[in-house]
Image (cartoon, rainbow, N blue to C red):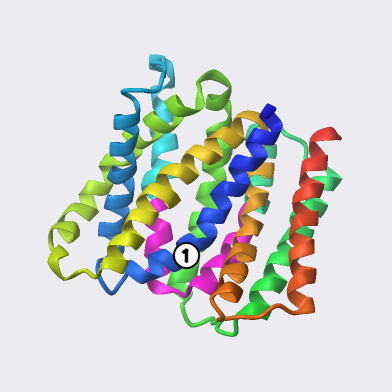
Amino acid sequence: MNNMVKAHVALLAANVIYGVNFIAVKEIIPAYMSWQALALFRGFGALALLLLAALYIKHESIEKRDIWKFVIAGLLGVTINQSLLVWGLELTGAVNASIIMTSNPLFVMIFAALLLKLPITRFKVLGVLVGAGGALLLIFTSHKHFSFTHSLGDIIILSNAVLYALYLVWIKPLMKKYNSFTVMKYTFLFGAPPVLLYGLQPAMLINFTVLPVTTYVAIAFVIVGATFLTYFFKIVGLQYVNPTTVSIYIYIQPVIATIIAVYMGKDSFSWYKIIAMLLVFIGVYLVNLSNKE
């Protein structure tokens, strides 16, 4: 498998997992724990897995002049991203969150142009717009519960979309200098500890003896799948493709959510959904074409 194929497979896998993550998070908060506690478990759970894996996976030491860059990457990609996502989901609906997060590729494209001097090409713009149109059509035809009443949660999710876009652009130069495992390890090493400031006390108040088995499964999925694996897959993708291409795969998430809903008998296919899915994949294809302009 060549590097480009590997990158796209990794990005597809990451967003398949993310597509399920919205459902898993809503199974956990706010019924069984606060968003602060879940953010703590995500950060330190993934960090523990990384430190364990570091015993077997080859990685490098980072240069002193790059430490501040990793500190910022950790704050943007772990502390802020993981906290804002679960905080926003506690205050707003999964549908609202998925709609707002479709703005992420637009912000990535803008930040990449400003910070990395990557051109905003016609295929990039067209791909982002077509993909966003498909994702929004799919969400609106699959769910009827979009609401403007969760304004604080929506603002938090939008802030997350912007800051995570900045993270994807910020970390790209580090990917050219260090291997993917090194970048991920130090990102979590600097990003997880700040969550202790607001996550430790709520985590200590949880009565784990009353949690149902399904909640434990959801927590394990969020930590191992939607945190550890997805961050690794996205970093692998960033090694070989530009940040906008990485972000455009977010449009796959509502596709996966819809397929799961249909499989579980909670939704059904229609011509609108098929057209929407086609638009999503066309959007991804167009952004990939931008690499050849």
The residue pinned by badge 1 equals 22
Q: Quadrant of the N terminus?
A: top right
* Amino acid under disc 1: Phe
Residue at (83, 41) in percent of width and height: 289
Q: From this view, report whether residue 274 is shown above or below residue 244.
A: below
Q: Position of residue 170 (x, y in %)?
A: 54, 35
Please give the range of residues in magenta. 81-104
Q: Main secondary structure of the magenta part?
A: helix
Q: Position of residue 249 (x, y in %)?
A: 65, 51
Per the image, is 86 magenta?
yes
In front of the other: 144 or 123: 144
Helix, strand, or loop for circle 1?
A: helix
Residue at (84, 34) in percent of width and height: 292
Residue at (45, 43) in percent of width and height: 229
* Dot 1 alpha-carbon crowd within 10 angstroms: few under 14, some 14 to 19, many 20 or more: many
Residue 206 visible to the viewer: no
Residue at (64, 73) in percent of width and height: 139
Determine whether, in the image, residue 111 is placed left or right of residue 17: right
Q: From this view, report whether residue 17 is shown above or below residue 94.
A: above
Q: Quadrant of the C terminus?
A: top right
In front of the other: 269 or 163: 269
Per the image, is 246 magenta?
no
In front of the other: 114 or 289: 289
